[in-house]
Amino acid sequence: MHTSPAVVVDEHAHDNPALLHHFSDERQQKNAASLGMWIFLATEVMFFGGMFCAYLVYRHWYFGDFSAASQTIAILPGAINTAILICSSLTVVLAVRAAQLNRRSQLVFWLLSTIVLGLVFLGIKGYEYHDKFVEHHVPGLNFSFVEALPGHVGAMANPHHAEIFFSLYFALTGMHALHMIIGVGLFSFLAFEAWRGRYTSNYYTPVENSGLYWHFVDIIWIYLFPLIYLIDRHK
Amino acid sequence: MANHATTQHPTEHISTVGSSVTIWLILLMCTGLTAWVAFIDLGPLNTVVALGIATFKATLVVLFFMHVKYTNEKLTPLVIVSALFFLGLLLSLSMADFATRLWH
C-alpha cells in the first residue's frame, strides 16, 4: 500500500484510525480536545459566576432576610444530594478508567451508574421543589413568607427580600438541574455508543470530556450546598 | 513513515481504583464535616469555614477527578487560573461597588 504514494493520504492512519491528519500525534489531538473543553468550562464559570455574584450582592443587602429564608430549606435532602453527586463523580472517574483500559462492559456499567445517580439527584431536587410549592415559597406564585428575623426578637423578615432569596434559589438550583439534565442526556448517548463498541483505549475523548463536564457540574453543587443550605444554619 | 517514532501510544495517566476511592471518601467526609460544623455558632467564621471546605473539595475534584494534576497539557492550568482570576474580578469589583455606595 505504501509503495504507491497517491494512495497514502494519511500516513498515521495505520496506527490509529481516530487520529485526524492535521494532528501530529494522538497526544496532541487529545490535548487539543481537552483544552477546548476546559475553555468551555471557563465560560461556564463566568455564566454561574454572574448568578453567584447576584446572590452575594443581595445577601449583603438583605442579610437577615436571607438568613430567615435560608433556614426554611431542609438540610437533609441537600446533604444527600451532595453525597449522590460525589458518588456520581467517582463513577465517572471509573468510567474513564474503564475506557482507558479497553473494558467495554465496565465502561457501559459505570456510565449507566452515573445516569442512575444523576436521575436520583434530579428526583430529590424535584421533591424539594415540591416542598417549596406546598410552602408557598415559589416567587410569583401565591408567595407568602411569615418567618421571624434571626437574632432580632419580635422582628419579622421582609417577605419581598425573602422572595429575592427564593428567586435566586430557583435560578441557581434550576440552572444546575438543567445542566444535570443535559449531563444525563450526554451520558445516555455515551452509554449507547460505548455499548456499540465506539470507544477504545485509542479513542475515548467524548467519555473524558463529558466526564470533565460532569465533574464541573458537581463542583457548582459543592458551592451551592453551603451557600444555600448551610451558612445561616447556626443563627 | 518518517513520523513513525512520534506516533507512539500516548502516556495517559490512568487513575488507580484505590486513589479514586480515597479521594471519594475524603469528599464524603468533608460533606459530613461541613454539614455538622454549620450548626456550631462560629459567628462570621461560619461562612469562611463553609466556603473553605467547599474550595478544598473543589480542588480535590479538579486535581484528581479531572486529572489536572497529571495532565501534560500546560495550557489547562492557565485556563483554570484565568477563569478563577476573572471570577474573582467579577465578585470583588462588584462588591467593592455595592458595599461602599450609600444607596440605602
Image: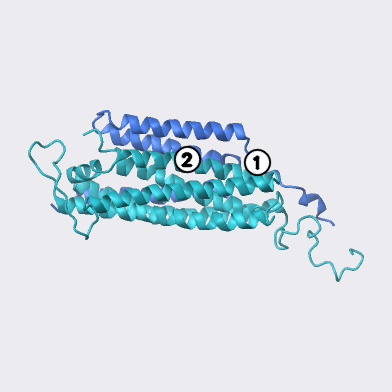
Chain colours: A cyan, B blue
Give A127 or A201, whichever is nearer the viewer. A127
Mark 2, secondary structure of its residue: helix
Is the residue marked by circle 1 packed among few (<14), some (14-19), or many (20+) residues within 10 Å? few
Q: Where is residue A50 in the image (x, y as percent from the top left)?
A: 34, 55
Q: Is residue A152 left or right of residue A58?
A: left
Q: Mark 1 points at which residue?
A: B13
Give B25 or A51, whichever is nearer the viewer. B25
Q: In this view, does A147 lie to the left or right of A114?
A: left
- Quarter occupied by the N terminus of chain A: bottom right
Q: Gap in Å between the C-alphas at discs 2 and 1?
A: 21 Å
Identify the chain of the residue marked 2, using the numbered disc in the image.
Answer: A
- Residue B56 figure quarter: top left
* x 92%, y 65%: residue: A3
Q: Name the residue under label 2.
A: A86
User: Residue most toward the bottom?
Assistant: A6
* x 70%, y 63%: residue: A22
